[in-house]
Amino acid sequence: MSLDRRRQLIEPGDPDLSVVRQCELVSISRSGFYHRPAGETALNLEVMRLIDAQFLQTPWYGSRQMARHLRREGYVVGRKRIRRLMAKMGLVPIYQRPRTTVPNPEHRIFPYLLRGLAIDRPNQVWCADITYLPMRRGFLYLVAVMDWATRKVLAWRVSNTMEVEFCIEALEEALARFGRPEIFNTDQGGQFTSPRFTGLLQQAGVRISMDGRGRWMNNVFIERLWRSLKYECVYLYAFETGSELRAGLSKWISYYNTARPHSTLAGQTPDEAYRAGAVERLAA
């Protein structure tokens, strides 16, 4: 359980349990409960928004090129600051390795299973990815589980940390609502290689596939989802709070699934393609 989750369990006004005792029960120190890390400055949040927008256009930009770009836009920033902010956002240029969080060397890396595979039916392959979401006064992270063949977003969660819990919650919802895929593909980020995440897939009888270095294009469909979501929703509305952001995401993802036709799906929406594919499988 994350530190933020454990903090939420503590009720300072509880008449029966002191804060100290509650901290002991959830395994955090009293100082850990009261400490709130300083957020980023308004300037850094603005720079992070600009980095995010530019990275969608030029995902090969490293900290040096990104700092150079921002200086041309009139921002006095150094490479060291840009490197720190890009790391905080989980952005890694594609010429070095896939866009992913830093891999955990203690976690098992599974082989890539999609080479030469024709992916043409629902629940054949699911994929997942994490992206950074800027807000007016802060930022959150979003994970989504997508059906590869139909582009349907099966489940999603938002978190203020990059810990594995919100990824597990999204996966559990997708499995509960849509059954299980034959293969689940992700990058090598520490959330997806976590034994808790991979164990859930193995328990469901799902084969696990992970992109190797240099295979960033394997998640191109979910990268396109991020681009559309950010330009049509996140950047447009610049949400103030997490609750506003969640409501906006819920509305946009519903529109994406049910009302947005795709040329690659013969003009169908993801929902229509998913249902049609499921009917064909039952008929067969």
Image: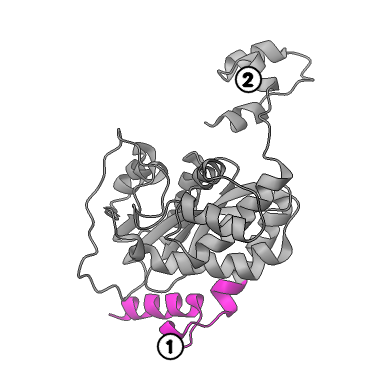
| Residue type pointed to by label 1 | Ala
Q: In the displayed structure, does residue 187 sit left or right of residue 240? A: left
Q: In the displayed structure, does residue 138 sit left or right of residue 197? A: right
| Residue type pointed to by label 2 | Gly
**Residue at 51% in and 60% down:** 55
Give the camera-side residue of 218 and 91.
Answer: 91
**Residue at 43% in and 45% down:** 101
| Residue 190 to residue 5: above or below | below
On whether residue 261 falls in the magenta region, the answer is yes
For residue 266, the mark is 1
Q: In the displayed structure, does residue 92 sit left or right of residue 66? A: left
Q: Which residue is mark 2?
A: 32
Q: Which residues are magenta?
A: 255-284
Give the camera-side residue of 75 and 231.
Answer: 75
Give the camera-side residue of 41 and 30.
Answer: 41
Q: In the displayed structure, does residue 148 sit left or right of residue 205? A: right
Give the camera-side residue of 18 and 68.
Answer: 68
Q: Around disc 2, counting alpha carbons within 10 Å, would you say few (fewer than 14), some (14 to 19), or many (20 or more)?
A: few
- Provide residue 178's location: percent of width, then percent of height: 44, 62
- Provide residue 118's location: percent of width, then percent of height: 25, 74
* Residue 143 seen in the current view: no
Residue farthest along the bottom direction in this orientation? 266
